[in-house]
Image (cartoon, coloured by chain):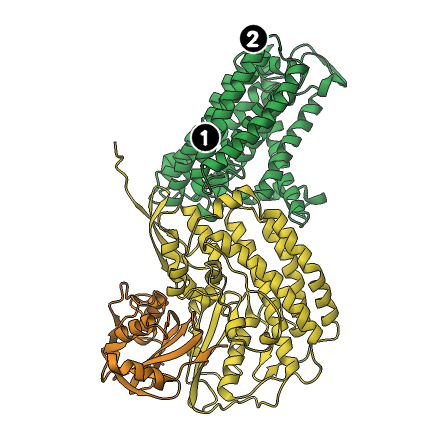
Amino acid sequence: MTTALSGRDVAQRLSDQFPNMVNLCDGSCLWVKPEAVAEVAKFLRDTPGLDFDYLASLTAVDFWDHFDVVYHLASLQRNHTLVLRCQLPGRQNLALPSVVDVWRGADLQEREAYDMFGIQFTGHPNMKRLLTWEGFPGHPLRKDWL
Amino acid sequence: MALRTEPIVVNMGPQHPATHGVFRMRVTLDGEVITDLEPVMGYLHRGVEKLAEARTYTQFIPLTDRMDYLSSMSNNLAYVLAVEKLAGVEAPPRAQYLRVIMAEMMRISNHLMAVGTFLDDMGAFHTPLLYMFREREKLLDLFEMVCGQRLTYNYMRIGGLSHDIPPEFLPALKKFVRDMPGFVDEYDQLIRENEIVLARTRGVGVLPRALAINASASGPVLRGSGVKWDLRKTDPYLVYDKLEFDVPTGAVGDIYDRYRVRIEEMRQSVRILEQAIERLPPGEVRSDVPHLVHPPRGEVYGHIEAPKGELGFYLVSDTGIAPYRCHIRPPSLINLTALRDMVLGMKIADAIITLGSIDIVLGEVDR
Amino acid sequence: MDWLRWIIFVVIILAFALSFVMAFILLERRIVGKFQLRPGPNRVGPMGMLQPVADAVKILLKEDITPAKGDRWVHRLAPIVAFAPALLVFAVVPFQGKGPGLGFSLDQPAALADLNVGVLYIVAVSSISVIGMIMAGWASNNKYSLLGAMRAIAQMVSYEVPLVLSIVGIVIASGSLSLNSIVEAQSIPFILLQPLGFLIYFLGATAEINRAPFDLLEAESEIVASYHTEYSGMRFAMFFLGEYAYALGVSAIVSVLFLGGYKFPFGLLPQSFIWFLAKIFLVFFLMLWVRSTLPRVRIDQMMAFAWKFLLPLSLVNLLLVAAEGVSTIGFGWAAVGINVILAIAFVVIWANRFYRVKGVTVG
């Protein structure tokens, strides 16, 4: 049975490595600052005991005043999960580091998030639109698109 | 003496007989050898996630049918399970067993189609495909019995099923379950030990175990690479923890392994069906859930082991009657991540069957 | 009265080729349908017999499109170059031999021209069609067509070699290059006398006319329709008919070279063109059987098969036949026994070795 790791416990393990990078944590989520996400991802993947080797899903949510980028992580070795989140304030010039180098599975999903929300993932080798065509007006899953 | 050669770029698709829909592979070729490949998609993009925000939770169910139209029941199931998790309701036991039955029938049907078209890509001139269509036809008849549809079922509801099965369904299903192992043996006999199949598939399109995990592959693609990971076992939903079945895995992660995993999964699905029929309890098939669901504020990620892999629904609720955000984790799309690594240095013919062995449906890749 | 005879035979051959091609198209669809648990086309006319006619009418009414950036004249000429040699093959095929036959008797062999270099003629003529394919692939200005043409060159040139070497065995045994004499020489059908030769010829010819499992030229799932991707209407029909005409041609040649042509096996019944036609259908059925069973091989596997499997075996076959010819064994029943056993042994040994040497990549 898959166990969902508590964000609070993981946050404690992270706090030594990344001081002031964990914003807040509630029961199930771990919120980190956008600029630290790639390093945190690498830490989560490589630390024994955490071993988050599998990125199940990557997406974003538009909350009008900010965007959330949500990573659903899983560990196939230990069969536990964690939700990693980043908050991107504002609606323009959204960017955060790409996690493609950590999990190749983020490749197409980050492109989709860019396509749908206009969030730039810096460091992604091929940051192009995925589903809509080049020159498509706007980013369709934003709440103000329609 | 080295020959001066010139690479050519071929756009395979969006209209191509073997890309399983409107998928495009931008292939750079050196003679017959692939030196680069870039998948291009989006020709079937309908904005299902955006549409979800403008529909009530129940109204979205028929749209899930149209994502992976070869396994609509599984899409239904993944979605209603996520909504149920969000709203905190549960389906009655009979509905849970019936859902398992539908999901496993769907898995067999999907794998028949996947293996059939894969062998077709290999140039087996439709014979295996049509043998497999014979059984798929029977499954579609069964689905038609329960919900009147043969492709887009719209059968699951939040908190249960749209209605109970008709009385003639179980005898027909029992007959199918009795006959199916023989038919699976027949497919094996037809093609398993075929010298050409072995030569074409062994050691071709290899997805190493580490890359499979790192590239978020799921379903038969992940298991073909030797990872024993099946959400029905590792994160049981419905009543899968009460049912007995094995998780077949491959050894090297080549095309042949993925093909074998699918064949074995059909046998296991038949096993699950046998047990589920035996234990099917009487009773209601739908708990008392209103048509307009108002889930509490919050979010949920629900996932199931769909025939093609991990199908996840990430739902965010703002207490309204429609999801604030609905994200779909499509296994077909994410399994394509490693396509380039699998075919580099291979021949064109290998790229085609590698794509066939990943088993994509463009309705789900593009949504 | 030679010119009268020629005209009559030209008409007969055209009628024979076109009607048999039609029949083949229908048969293929019906028989493959049976293999695939479906009825096949059965709506047009009795048992669907008018289906090829309906298809032909449909395809004649289609627009004839030339790609805007293609080479116009080469594109137009290519189907003719590919199709014509298929008909030329039948010029030397003997339909019935001299002397009394079933029903009537002839004072000379029933063939347009009983060339004394018939075998050479067939090999030469049937190689021309590859030029048509290359022309089509080049002129279409389409990458799939070009890939198809590239495969065509590779495939046809490679398979020609074992093909010809296997025919040489026949020529040694019969002592003649004339097809009629080859038939006459078959008191024992050559398929029994040279089973290895038959196998090599059949496989080589299957590859030569691009039928499964060597149908890489028109590997639909890989390169769409290969060299005729850009063709439509009548020009496409010529390629299509050409393919079946070649299938017919190969069936006829196999019947003549290995199955005893118009002779009834072991002379139990008088000779007749009916046996010849029956053998043609038999060979064609074999091709259909293979087609509806086997997947396609890959290009490198196909080349390896020609050069590393068929070519050594055809040399062995040639040596064997030649040795029997000069020794006291001759070409009688003793040779049949030896050759059948040796053929089985060679195929098994060489197939095993071939598989082991190349590991899992080539089968």
Question: Residue at (69%, 72%) from the top-left corner?
Answer: B277
What residue sits right under mark 2 in the picture?
A: C326
Q: Secondary structure at mark 2?
A: helix
Q: Residue furthest front?
A: A48
Q: Amino acid at mark 2?
A: Val
Question: Residue at (60%, 61%) from the top-left corner?
Answer: B266
Q: Which mark is residue B112?
A: none
Q: Check the rendered structure and report the hue given to chain C.
A: green
Q: Secondary structure at mark 1?
A: helix
Q: Check the rendered structure and report the hue given to chain B.
A: yellow
Q: Check the rendered structure and report the hue given to chain A.
A: orange
Residue C257, picture quadrant: top right
Q: Nearer the viewer, residue B143 or C324?
A: C324
> Residue C175: where, in percent of width, then height?
57, 10
Q: Which mark is residue C308?
A: 1
Residue A18 sits above or below residue A125 on the image: below
Image position of B228 (left or right of A19): right
> Residue C13: where, in percent of width, then height?
60, 24
